Image (spheres, rainbow, N blue to C red):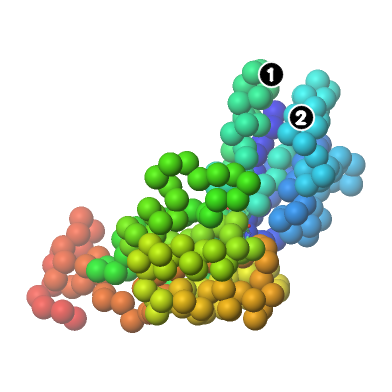
Amino acid sequence: MVHFVGAGSGAPDLITLRGDALLRRADVVIWAGSLVNPRLLEVCRDDCEIFDSATMTLEEVLDRMRAAEERGLEVVRLHTGDPCMYGAIQEQMDALDKMGIAYDVVPGVSSFCGAAAALRTELTAPGISQTVTLTRLAGRTPMPEGEDMAALASRGGTMVIFLSAGHLDRLQEELLAAGRDADEPAAIVYKATWPDEKVMRCTVGTLAQTGADNAVRSTALVVVGRVLAGDVPRSCLYDPSFETAFRPAHQGRG
Ligand code: SAH
């Protein structure tokens, strides 16, 4: 059995209880050493076999999984954040299906949630943004048609941009070309929830300069949107005049 486990965004106590329990009893752990906090491995058994997938190909990862399955061992495949975002787990699951090896997926705290926490910002705010676009710039992986930055950024709303910290000048250019205002609030969050976390607030027009000034090249997210300005209108949900299934309406605002 293979368990794909989300390690969370960095801090070792942000893994789920379920993920932690699986790590503690795993016979084999294949972990994404380039991004997962090594402190998470401290709970592994002394005789647990640990492999760093940063140095492995997909074939090598699958070979390890197959060998473990043949020996009746339990494998944890530890991915950074939540495995559903840029985790490359689909290709592993498809291969396990073909090999007839059972697996499940344990979610984790994605770095975009870690970044929102670091910023102390709600990514959705009434009247300002009710949509969050999670995306990236094209890199070696091209963007499918209609998903280029120009198309996505021109729709408005909050954006969280992964895997693009090395190309902040291009990102800034594409956001401006898509019609985002140079003065619109933005932020770069480096290593959210790690001990060396760094939050850099800026604007769309100063993204590249801010990144350069702080030597940001990787392990960072870019957040763009008016929600970052704070001081948002209050929600209907907790308005006294708003009735919900759990609370009758009160007269006037409290
Ligand atoms: N599955 C992961 C994303 C993997 S892609 C998740 O859910 O977070 C790797 C990219 O995620 C990095 O290039 C960076 O953009 C972002 N990232 C991962 N961890 C991060 C962190 N702690 N702080 C900021 N960005 C992070």
Task: Kindly give the residue lying farthest to the right in the view shown.
Answer: 47
Q: What label does residue 59 carry, if any?
A: 2
Q: What percent of the width, then of the height, locates residue 162? A: 56, 57
Residue at mark 1: C-beta within 8 A of ligand 1: no
Q: What residue type is labelled 2?
A: Glu
Judged from the image, the quadrant occupied by ligand 1 is: bottom right
Direction from residue 209 to residue 227 in the image, left or right: left
CA distance for labels 1 and 2: 13 Å
Residue depicted at 72% across the width and 39% down the height: 76
- Report which residue position mark 1 lands on: 99
First along the sequence among labels 1 and 2: 2
Q: What percent of the width, then of the height, locates residue 121? A: 44, 72
In the rendered image, which quarter contains the N terminus?
top right
Q: Nearer the viewer, residue 48 or 142?
A: 142
Q: What percent of the width, then of the height, locates residue 6? A: 62, 48
Q: What label does residue 187 carry, if any?
A: none
